[in-house]
Image (spheres, rainbow, N blue to C red):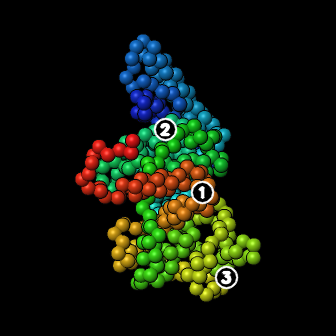
Amino acid sequence: MKVTLRQKKISKGMISLYLDFYPPLVDPETKKSTRREFLKLYLYEKPRGVLEKNHNKETKIQADSIRSSRQLDIQANRFDFIFKDTKQIDFLAFFKKLTGQRWKSDGNHGNWLSTYNYLERFTHGQCSTTDIDKAFCEDFKNYLQTTTSIKSESRKLSQNSQASYFSKFSVAVEEAFKKGYLKENYMLRVDAIRQKETEREFLTLEELRALFSTECEFPVLKVAAIFSALTGLRWSDLTNLTWGEIQYSEINGHFIRFIHEKTDRPQTLNIAQQAVDILGYPRNKEDKIFQGLKYSAWTNLKLSEWVMRAGITKKITFHCFRHTYATLQLSLGTDIYTVSKLLNHKNVKTTQIYAKVIDQRRKEAAERIPDLGPGDKGMRIA
């Protein structure tokens, strides 16, 4: 058994020191193997001044002392230094298992799978829970912000892709901590990557009416889309909605009581009579309302054809109907806090994005009146 001291460049001009075991160490209980132990010791990549040079010199001596100690421990069959406190597992395998549990939404599963691919590339296919610490999390964050896309080496990941992938990694770290595989949730000490605000396309009331009166080749798609625009429900919530979840009371009228697929939070959502009317006659309580509605390229094609047939030139995706619900509510005077609750947003800041869109459209509307023509440029009221 050979123990080698190695270096790995990390962010902010630092180098992380770790031990490389060959052949790999095998946990006698779990039978899992590992080749690395990160020492949580760091060097300056380009030391400046006497202090930084002395720091590097002393840290190397300390690291080599640990390496010698580990060599002696291994020769004496003592492995507590690496198999201790927490149960060591293959973090990549753990992440892949979590990815396999995200099939409720195609888009969400795709993001988890992409995150796994970047994590695998970052770790060169080997990553144990003993490798995970704050520095590792910071390094993976920096990697996402600087690496090129797997699909195209000529471009980097978009900021929103970076944010999405790092968010999935954060969830996995938290889950590993809860199960006792990590000593702490290191992501609590690492800043998230912020999402970049994007233009949220939506339909005006006139455009929604045009769609409502336009035939769609895929009827269940039309009903689901209009229902989304009248309730704000996501695709993932609609595809799982059953007749038994639509309820009625004399006091509250019609409402839906369900668990959000994306947030996994319960919600009671009041819905308008016209939203209920477009669904048609109720069937068995356990039956799905939008039977046959599945995400596919063909479904997207039928949506685009329906939108064009209605004379709308905007690029409309199914999620735009949720945006439409939010913007219509705000445009018609519903306060932002109520809209936030209706959309089941955790933070009202998310809802404020729609308010900014409304403000921008109002500003554009104010400029639509054409120039009145030549006149007395010096004309003033006073």
Judge whether residue 100 can be spotted in this image: no
Q: Amino acid at mark 1?
A: Asp
Which residue is denoted by mark 1 in the rendering? Answer: 335
Residue under the point 44% across and 72% down: 206
Q: Amino acid at mark 2?
A: Glu
Q: Earlier in the sequence, mark 2 or mark 3?
A: 2
For the C terminus, give its image quadrant: top left
Provide residue 136's location: percent of width, then percent of height.
50, 39
Which residue is denoted by mark 2 in the rendering? Answer: 138
Provide residue 115's location: percent of width, then percent of height.
46, 53
Q: Which mark is residue 232?
A: none
Closer to us: mark 2 or mark 1?
1
Residue under the point 43% across and 40% down: 142
Residue 111, compared with residue 222, is above or below; it is above
Closer to us: mark 1 or mark 3?
1
Q: Amino acid at mark 3?
A: Lys
Residue farthest toward the front in the current orientation of the protein: 382
- Rounded to the nearest angstrom, the CA distance separating label 1 from label 3 is 34 Å
Q: Earlier in the sequence, mark 2 or mark 1?
A: 2
Query: Considering the numbered disc 3 on the image, is that residue within a helix, a strand or a loop?
Result: loop
173 vs 8, nearest the viewer: 173
Do tag 2 and tag 3 residues touch (Cβ < 8 Å)? Answer: no
